[in-house]
Each structure stands twice: as C-alpha cells, then as structure tokens.
Image (spheres, rainbow, N blue to C red):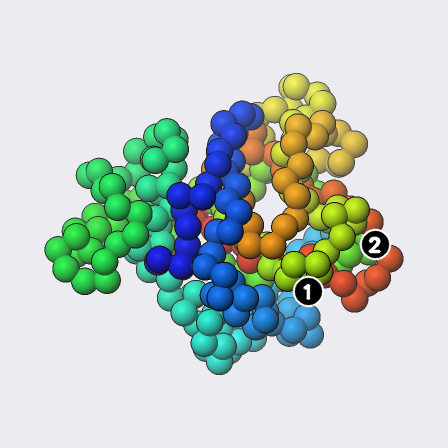
C-alpha cells in the first residue's frame, strides 16, 4: 500500500530487532486516521486492571469494533489492507531488507509495494496462500488507549502466538507533552536468570532495566519481532487528567 513508508524504518538489533519509522503514513491519510479514531465510550474493558489499558478489536468488544470499521471509510480501507496478503508481504520484506532473515518467503520478492493486479501480485498471492497453509499466519489490529493519569503496560515479551508487532501512534502535533512520558521502553531483566521468557511472564517495573525509550510521537510506527527476550513496556504516564489518552493502533502478525 503506497500510503505506508516501510523504507523509513531504522533498526536496532540488540537486545532484539526493533525498528522505528517517522512519517510512516502519507500525511493526509494519517490525518484521517487521527480524526476518525473511535470514541472512548465504545471501547471494551481493561486488558489488565493494573494498567487501565482499554482495547477495541476482534477480541475486545468485537461487535462494536466491526460496526465501527464498517461505518468508518478510512478504517474500513485500513482494515482491508491489514487483512490482505500485501500487508504480510510488505512487513516480511521490510525485515528481509534490514538483514533480519526470517526465511518465511518461499521465493525472494523484492518489491515492498505491490501492483494491485498482474502477474507479480498473483505470484505473491500464490506464495502467501501456501505460506498461510504451511505456517498459519494472520494479521489483525486493535485500537488501544491508555489514560494519561497513570496508564501503563507492564513489562512483557508478548504471547508466543505473536510473530511481529507494529504500534502506530495516533495523535496530532501538539496534543502530547513529552514530559508526561508514554514512550515505549526496551528492557532487560535485572536478574539475568529470567532473560529467557518466550512464554511471556510479566515483570514488575522495578525488576527491569531500561535500555532505550522510544518517544510517543505523531505518525511514528514501531516494528519489532517477538523473541524470547523482546521485553518492553509503557511506564506509568505522568499526567493528572484522566480524560487525556495515549492512543495507538496495534497490529499483530500471529500464528494460528
């Protein structure tokens, strides 16, 4: 999809592969995603009572999620792309182009922006049909919100079924004060014996050391690979207003 700039990703490779892309989405399309983000009233309950994170997705309030997507043209279009073979191809190819050899393609495909018809696209569809039968891959996305008065996501490595995660910040310029926090922290456990955590045990914040913080910024996408040590979090946000929210779209490619 030409609205998404995968070539903007800049990767770190330790302790696990994680890329950050500024100006990831074409500006007008991004503006429409921001302006049409769903109202907080239709979100589902808390993922985790300790974090106050709320979601709207195929898993959380699915009826309201599907109704909102159907009735909102920009998110209907976004949904179709995320569910398409093109999306999985684009993400896998982004990793390959950045020397992260996942070996999920059955043949090398170099173009990260595919035509909507013709032999090249038919070839990709054929490859990905075989890939899905063999590997059982699918993609989905959720709307996520964290209240600014202490909202957080505890340190974790993601569920084993997740292979790749993208987190797209949803906000206008000037909406967020960096002093509030809200960035994504890349972590490692202070107790090295707990480094291997493929099955996603949660940590307390004080049990982890922060290696890097990726600031919460407009039109920024974070892309990372699920590994045994892909430990990350959002530390408690430091603002007093419960009516201000850290908004994002979280996209997962997962095995089924």
How far across and how far down the image is residue 109, in percent?
23, 42
- Residue farthest to the right? 240
Quickly name the residue at label 2: 239
The residue lying at 74 percent from left, 48 percent from top is: 178
- Viewer-nearest of labels 2 and 1? 2
Left-right relation of 81 to 32: left
How far across and how far down the image is residue 164, in percent?
46, 43
How far across and how far down the image is residue 139, in percent?
41, 55
Above-or-below relation of 224 to 246: above
**Mark 1 packing: few (<14 Cα in 10 Å), some, or many (20+)?**
some
Give me the disc on residue 45.
Answer: 1
- Residue farthest to the left? 119
Q: Earlier in the sequence, mark 2 or mark 1?
A: 1
Say whether residue 213 is visible.
yes
The residue lying at 48 percent from left, 36 percent from top is: 10
Give me the disc on residue 105.
Answer: none
User: For this rendering, which residue is in front, 122 or 42?
Assistant: 122
User: For this rendering, which residue is in front, 173 or 213?
Assistant: 173
**Mark 2 packing: few (<14 Cα in 10 Å), some, or many (20+)?**
some
The residue lying at 55 percent from left, 54 percent from top is: 219
Secondary element under disc 2, as helix, strand or loop, is loop
- Residue farthest to the top? 192
How far across and how far down the image is residue 16, in percent?
52, 29
Above-or-below relation of 95 to 229: below
Secondary element under disc 1, as helix, strand or loop, is loop
The residue lying at 34 percent from left, 48 percent from top is: 90
Above-or-below relation of 82 to 199: below
Residue 85, quarter of picture: bottom left
* Label 2 with label 1: CB-CB less than 8 Å: no
Say whether residue 133 is visible.
no
């Amino acid at each position: 999809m030409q609205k998404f700039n995968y070539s903007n990703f800049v990767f770190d490779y330790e302790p696990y592969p994680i890329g950050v892309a500024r100006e990831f989405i074409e500006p007008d399309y991004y503006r429409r995603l921001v302006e049409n983000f769903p109202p907080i009233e239709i979100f589902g309950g808390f993922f985790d009572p300790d974090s106050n994170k709320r979601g709207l997705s195929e898993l959380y309030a699915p009826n309201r999620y599907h109704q909102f997507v159907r009735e909102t043209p920009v998110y209907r279009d976004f949904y179709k792309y995320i569910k398409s073979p093109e999306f999985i191809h684009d993400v896998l190819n982004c990793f390959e182009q950045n020397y992260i050899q996942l070996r999920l393609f059955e043949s090398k495909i170099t173009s990260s922006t595919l035509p909507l018809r013709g032999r090249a696209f038919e070839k990709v569809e054929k490859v990905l049909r075989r890939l899905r039968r063999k590997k059982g891959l699918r993609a989905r996305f959720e709307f996520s919100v964290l209240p600014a008065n202490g909202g957080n996501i505890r340190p974790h490595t993601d569920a084993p079924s997740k292979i790749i995660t993208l987190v797209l910040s949803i906000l206008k310029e000037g909406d967020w004060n960096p002093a509030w926090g809200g960035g994504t922290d890349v972590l490692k456990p202070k107790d090295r014996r707990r480094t291997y955590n493929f099955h996603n045990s949660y940590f307390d914040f004080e049990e982890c050391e922060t290696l890097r913080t990726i600031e919460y910024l407009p039109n920024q996408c974070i892309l990372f690979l699920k590994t045994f040590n892909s430990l990350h979090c959002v530390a408690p946000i430091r603002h007093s207003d419960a009516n201000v929210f850290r908004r994002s779209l979280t996209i997962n490619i997962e095995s089924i």
